[in-house]
């Protein structure tokens, strides 16, 4: 074997699936027949009710490298893992896998509920290809890692789902594969256990193992992957450095979930209308941003309160401000009024943010109008910024070493 | 998990749409390697299923024999009430005759159902974990054998109760037992690819089993003449059951040898084919199996 050959090599993979159950069964019989007469599964077209789950996907994973897969549900992430694991056959293309593969998918597969944790460890070890003797040697280590000593001799049907996942993970990680496929399983157990799992995975990577990781959690991907492939409807939309692809993906996700016309809700009785909310479409992290709000009132309002909230894609409020708290006198006359709000520095992480505007007559009571995410702006990454988290604070580092005199 | 220093001899697997049948040598080499590694897994899975099955019962292993006992009892009552009048062609007590038939019939049915029920019972595992499918077949066979051995023990008790002598040739009983299990597994195994897709196969098996029981010498020996005699003559199970009783309780063995050998030989050859077929189509079945 060529020493430089990557452990996972996916070349121009296409995979078709069927939406209709009845047809799927019929195609199943067709496919079985084709396989038996030696014609194989290669096909370039779709039969009725079929769709491409993967279209011309190519990627490689090198030794010591961790590649993340992101994308919507149904984008083809799990299908790709199944193909790499050899569970299903491609319709076109070629996958080369060099080394032993372990898939951390649906932990606890093969567990029987009426058997004890200890019995299930033996079964799960056997499924992973261990002999009876090896399984016994590993058992204590697995139990210790799972921290389930107290419950190990009770049937697993009395375990909580978190406990089950812990046991499953403990069994799965006490193996020595060359390649690890991880599918959305790390959100198990409590935080402490989760950290322990990631520690294991990172050890594996630094030891030269190759990892392919599927997750919907951007933090998981950012923290654990060197490169990311973004799948969209079976196609690799982008592949590259984690932070770059994740940024673009998150912005796209936020745009997708951004309020469409139907979702922009205006609450209120019509006394005041938000005519327009305007801000720059895109800023660089740390820049200033100005929000201009045009209101139109049917009657004059003495001492109303204007509320402006910046919201992140996930919906969390990033900055909530109102004129009462900020001690600003407001008067809205009949007709048009303009309110301008300037945020001098916006040190936000790259992503898409929304501006929500509301006007009330007294604090929190008698809401006159609320306009959710009327305007949106994108925050771009500063070139030298490589951090993660909610804010991009560009810290300055200083390292001082004190020599200890003995 | 420690990544071991990258093993340069680590297996290289290539997945393409091509059918492995085009490289029969690779297909066989792969299959043989999997057989080696699937034994301990198959054994472990069988132990899992057997333990789990009986752990949740009050009567435990008695359930391996109760159905056979009850069926025998019904036939014995029918026979002694003169509703049936079975001529067993020997001095054998009818209950012993019927129980022997039932036990070997159950062996056939268990073996027949084993491949498909193993496959559907382990669906969730199959669609998520890659492991040799032989392990499931092996596990199924171990479970069939386990339940058969318990039933044999019951037969021993009943024989003692009736003070029925057995012939020395009884030591060859594993042969017809093996042949019956092989025939069942082969038929079940060959139906499995289709059965994994269409539930009709499972339903069909259930529907066919009862009529088959009546054309097999389970509760009565083949009649000398008439339509049933003709049908039984073509039933591959007939020589196996006849040979079983002859080995155990006496009677002519020679007339069964040729047909016995033919059925056994055909089963083994078909078993080999069925096994390779199942290996070939496994990924196609998994893809259409939803857990």
Image (spheres, coloured by chain):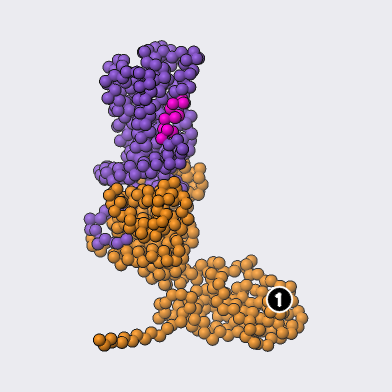
Chain colours: A orange, B purple
Please report the bounds of the magenta region as a residue range: B61-71
Against A370, residue B208 (above or below) is above
Against A53, residue A251 (above or below) is below
Residue under the image location 69 percent in, 84 percent down: A337
Displayed quadrant of residue A370 = bottom right
User: Does residue B137 appear anywhere in the picture?
Assistant: no
Horizontal relation, residue A403 to residue A33: left or right: left
Magenta stretch, main secondary structure, is helix
Q: Which quarter of the rendered picture does the N terminus of chain A lie within?
A: bottom left
Q: Is residue B65 magenta?
A: yes
User: Does residue A129 appear anywhere in the picture?
Assistant: yes
The local secondary structure at tag 1 comes to strand
Against A376, residue B165 (above or below) is above
Residue under the image location 28 percent in, 87 percent down: A403
Image location of residue B206, percent across then percent down: 47, 31
**Front residue (pair A405, A291):** A405
Image location of residue A406, percent across then percent down: 25, 86
Mark 1 falls within which chain? A
Residue under the image location 61 percent in, 81 percent down: A321
- Mark 1, Cα crowd under 10 Å, few <14 / some 14-19 / many 20+, is few
Write down the residue under mark 1: A365
Against B14, residue A208 (above or below) is below
**Front residue (pair B132, B90):** B90
Displayed quadrant of residue A219 = bottom left
């Amino acid at each position: 074997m060529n020493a430089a050959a990557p452990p996972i090599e996916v070349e121009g993979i296409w995979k078709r699936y069927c939406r209709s159950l009845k047809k799927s069964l019929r195609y199943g019989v067709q496919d079985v027949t084709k396989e038996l007469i030696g014609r194989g599964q290669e096909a370039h077209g779709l039969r009725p009710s079929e769709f491409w789950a993967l279209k011309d996907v190519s990627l490689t994973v090198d030794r010591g490298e961790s590649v993340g897969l992101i994308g919507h549900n149904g984008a083809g992430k799990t299908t790709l893992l199944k193909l790499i694991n050899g569970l299903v056959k491609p319709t076109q293309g070629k996958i080369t896998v060099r080394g032993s593969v372990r898939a951390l998918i649906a932990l606890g597969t093969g567990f029987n509920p009426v058997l004890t944790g200890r019995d299930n460890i033996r079964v799960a070890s056997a499924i992973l290809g261990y002999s009876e003797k090896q399984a016994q040697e590993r058992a204590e280590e697995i139990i210790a890692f799972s921290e389930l000593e107290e419950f190990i001799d009770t049937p697993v049907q009395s375990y909580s789902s978190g406990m089950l996942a812990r046991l499953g993970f403990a069994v799965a990680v006490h193996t020595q594969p060359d390649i690890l496929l991880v599918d959305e399983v790390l959100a198990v157990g409590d935080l402490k256990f989760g950290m322990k799992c990631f520690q294991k995975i990172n050890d594996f990577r630094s030891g030269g193992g190759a990892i392919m990781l599927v997750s919907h959690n951007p933090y998981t991907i950012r923290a654990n992957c060197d490169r990311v492939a973004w799948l969209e409807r079976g196609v690799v939309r982008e592949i590259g450095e984690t932070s770059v692809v994740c940024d673009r993906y998150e912005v796209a996700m936020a745009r997708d979930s951004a309020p469409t016309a139907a979702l922009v809700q205006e609450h209120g009785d019509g006394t005041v209308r938000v005519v327009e909310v305007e801000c720059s479409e895109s800023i660089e992290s740390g820049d200033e941003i100005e929000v201009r709000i045009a209101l139109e009132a049917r009657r004059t309002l003495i001492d109303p309160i204007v509320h402006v909230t910046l919201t992140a894609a996930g919906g969390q409020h990033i900055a909530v401000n109102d004129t009462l708290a900020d001690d600003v006198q407001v008067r809205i006359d009949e007709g048009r009024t303009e309110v301008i709000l300037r945020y001098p520095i916006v040190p936000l992480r790259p992503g898409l943010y929304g501006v929500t505007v509301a006007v009330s007559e007294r604090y929190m009571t008698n809401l006159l109008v609320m306009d959710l995410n009327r305007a949106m702006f994108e925050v771009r990454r500063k070139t030298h910024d490589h951090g993660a988290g909610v804010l991009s604070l560009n810290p300055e580092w200083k390292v001082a070493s004190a020599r200890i005199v003995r | 998990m420690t990544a071991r220093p990258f093993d340069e001899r680590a297996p290289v697997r290539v997945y393409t749409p091509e059918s492995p049948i085009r490289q029969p040598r690779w297909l066989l080499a792969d299959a043989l390697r999997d057989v080696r590694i699937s034994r301990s897994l198959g054994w472990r899975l069988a132990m899992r299923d057997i333990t789990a099955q009986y752990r949740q019962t009050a009567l435990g292993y008695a359930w391996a024999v109760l159905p056979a006992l009850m069926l025998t009892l019904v036939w014995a009552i029918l026979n002694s009430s003169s509703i049936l009048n079975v001529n067993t062609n020997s001095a054998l007590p009818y209950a012993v005759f019927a129980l022997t038939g039932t036990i070997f019939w159950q062996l056939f049915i268990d073996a027949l159902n084993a491949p498909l029920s193993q496959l559907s019972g382990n669906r969730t595992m199959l669609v998520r974990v890659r492991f040799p499918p032989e392990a499931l077949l092996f596990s199924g066979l171990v479970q069939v054998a386990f339940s058969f051995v318990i039933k044999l023990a019951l037969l021993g008790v009943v024989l003692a109760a009736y003070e029925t002598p057995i012939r020395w040739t009884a030591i060859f009983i594993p042969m017809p037992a093996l042949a019956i299990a092989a025939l069942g597994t082969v038929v079940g195994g060959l139906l499995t690819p289709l059965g994994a897709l269409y539930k009709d196969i499972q339903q069909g098996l259930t529907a066919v089993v009862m009529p088959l029981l009546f054309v097999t010498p389970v509760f009565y020996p083949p009649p000398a003449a008439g339509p049933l005699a003709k049908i039984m003559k073509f039933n591959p199970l007939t020589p196996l059951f006849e040979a079983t009783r002859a080995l155990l309780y006496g009677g002519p063995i020679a007339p069964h040898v040729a047909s016995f050998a033919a059925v056994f030989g055909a089963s083994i050859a078909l078993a080999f084919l069925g096994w390779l077929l199942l290996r070939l189509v496994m990924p196609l079945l998994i893809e259409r199996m939803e857990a």
